[in-house]
């Protein structure tokens, strides 16, 4: 069913119809379209267009259709329907006859679709809040399980300094917490109501737009009808938040893929989130994390798609904007899957404590501790840095750890070294010296875990 046609003498070309129709995509907005239609029916009733009986009949039919869709989300799509709006209107006319044709009085598909889509995006953001909260919980739980596990931190993918594994987990918790804040900020600009803007110039019917917004749970009506029907900033902003989140998930996945490799061997992923090889029986592949990493490009591509769609559009509505839904719907579905799968990866992750400790011991990651020891003896840091570099070179030549060098070997490089150096080189000693807010000291990490849980508990 087309919502237009009186102006035209011929039917649309079949190929053009296939090109033009959006029902297979915007069917995802069916519930939102009905909610918007119920709100509009109430609005035009208050404006004197519908009688109380007509409002009751329309609302009852729409509510029944909504229940039907909620119970059977896979809609019985029909070829004549151009989009979800025409599908809902056709079903409404089937239920109440010509009365169904009155519902669109004063409303355009332009403000209708803008309203539906904002309702949909708002619901998707709210769903991501819950999933992000669970992913953050999983990271905090992992930190709690590994708060005594010492491992190596990396820069340039080279062993750098000893850290607690929990400190690594909490770093990603911080990223996801910021992602939740970005979605919350985007939601503020999603949550305004375009309904009543008409096609571009507003409606001639004296509807109460503040009440319409309230009925649909929006914070306020939009302020300019031209902007309201053509604005897709809220889509771009939501996709930007989703892309940022996907990038963080990709980085986390990459770390876990590396840590699970035989070369690192620090973690082992559970069989339930891994797969094997069709040829090599010994393989255990981190496919869950590889797919999370791979989805990042797809989600970021949705942001690029939407940005390019609106880049050169004149005011107000243009058919190009029909391309707004598929990227957003797909991106949010993929991000949802990534977040939910990540929780299963983290909750079942095994950290090999002995191997993790070896990475901190074997890569001269305690070299900075040695430099700090020399600084404490009054040696300028730059000079201490040079001395330690030479000691590392001696250790590499002898194929031993720094702490395995004899006192005489150390004093041959700098006579100011004494036996207290070995206490400074112990991993736990270095960690305890980093009891600073945001540091990797055991006390600081324990406090960070507790603070993260408290913020999580108080979040939406």
Image: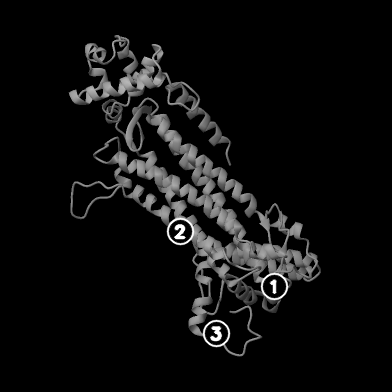
Residue 150: image quadrant is top left
Q: Which mark is residue 39?
A: none
Kindly tell me whether residue 40 is visible in this rendering: yes
Residue 310: image quadrant is bottom right
**Could you tell me which secondary element the residue under label 1 belongs to?**
loop
Q: Which mark is residue 104?
A: 1
- 412 and 20: which is toward the camera: 412
For residue 417, above or below residue 234:
above
Side of 42 where 2 appears, left or right = left
**What's the CA distance linking mark 1 and mark 2?**
36 Å
**Could you tell me which secondary element the residue under label 3 belongs to?**
loop
Q: Which mark is residue 12?
A: 3
- Between circles 3 and 1, the one closer to the viewer is 3
Q: Which mark is residue 301?
A: 2
Sequence order check, earlier mark of 2 and 3: 3
For residue 422, above or below residue 293:
above
Side of 111 where 392 appears, left or right = left
Callout 3: few (<14), some (14-19), or many (20+) C-alpha neighbours within 10 Å? few
- In the rendered image, residue 262, in percent from the top left (x then y), is placed at 24, 39
Number of marks in the rendered image: 3
- In the rendered image, residue 162, in percent from the top left (x then y), is placed at 35, 26
Side of 7 where 171 appears, left or right = left
């Amino acid at each position: 069913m087309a919502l237009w046609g009186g102006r035209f003498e011929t039917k649309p070309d079949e190929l053009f119809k296939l090109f033009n129709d959006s029902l297979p995509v915007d069917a995802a907005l069916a519930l939102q379209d009905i909610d918007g239609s119920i709100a509009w029916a109430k609005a035009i009733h208050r404006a004197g267009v519908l009688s109380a009986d007509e409002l009751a009949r329309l609302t009852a039919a729409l509510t029944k259709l909504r229940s039907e869709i909620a119970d059977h989300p896979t809609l019985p799509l029909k070829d004549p329907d151009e989009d979800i709006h025409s599908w809902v209107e056709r079903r409404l006319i089937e239920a109440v006859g010509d009365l169904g044709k009155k519902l669109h009085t004063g409303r355009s598909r332009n403000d209708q679709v803008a309203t539906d889509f904002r309702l949909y995006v708002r619901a998707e953001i709210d769903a991501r809040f819950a999933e992000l909260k669970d992913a953050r919980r999983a990271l905090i739980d992992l930190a709690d399980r590994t708060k005594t596990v010492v491992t190596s931190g990396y820069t340039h993918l080279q062993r750098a300094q000893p850290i607690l594994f929990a400190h690594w987990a909490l770093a990603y918790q911080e990223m996801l917490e910021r992602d939740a804040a970005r979605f919350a900020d985007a939601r503020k600009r999603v949550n305004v109501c375009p309904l009543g803007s008409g096609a571009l110039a507003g409606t001639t019917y004296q509807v109460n737009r503040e009440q319409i917004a309230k009925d649909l749970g929006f914070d306020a009506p939009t302020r300019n009808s031209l902007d309201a029907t053509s604005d897709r900033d809220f889509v771009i902003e939501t996709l930007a938040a989703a892309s940022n989140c996907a990038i963080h998930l990709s980085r986390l996945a990459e770390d876990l893929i590396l840590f699970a490799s035989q070369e690192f061997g620090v973690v082992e992923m559970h069989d339930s989130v891994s797969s094997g090889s069709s040829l090599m029986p010994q393989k255990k592949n981190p496919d869950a994390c590889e797919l999370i990493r791979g989805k990042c490009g797809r989600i970021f591509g949705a942001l690029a798609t939407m940005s390019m769609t609106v880049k050169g559009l004149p005011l107000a509505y243009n058919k190009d904007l029909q391309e707004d839904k598929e990227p957003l719907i797909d991106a949010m579905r993929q991000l949802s899957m990534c977040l939910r799968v990540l929780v299963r990866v983290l909750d079942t992750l095994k950290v090999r404590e002995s191997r993790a400790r070896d990475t901190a011991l074997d890569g001269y990651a305690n070299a900075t501790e040695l430099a700090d020891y020399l600084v404490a003896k009054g040696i300028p840091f730059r000079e201490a840095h040079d001395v330690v570099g030479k000691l590392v070179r001696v250790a590499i030549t002898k194929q031993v750890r720094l702490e395995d060098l004899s006192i005489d070997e150390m004093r041959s490089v700098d006579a100011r070294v004494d036996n207290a150096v070995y206490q400074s080189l112990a991993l736990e000693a270095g960690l305890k010296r980093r009891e600073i807010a945001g540091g990797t000291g055991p006390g600081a990490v324990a406090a960070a875990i507790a603070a993260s849980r408290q913020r999580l508990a108080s979040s939406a």
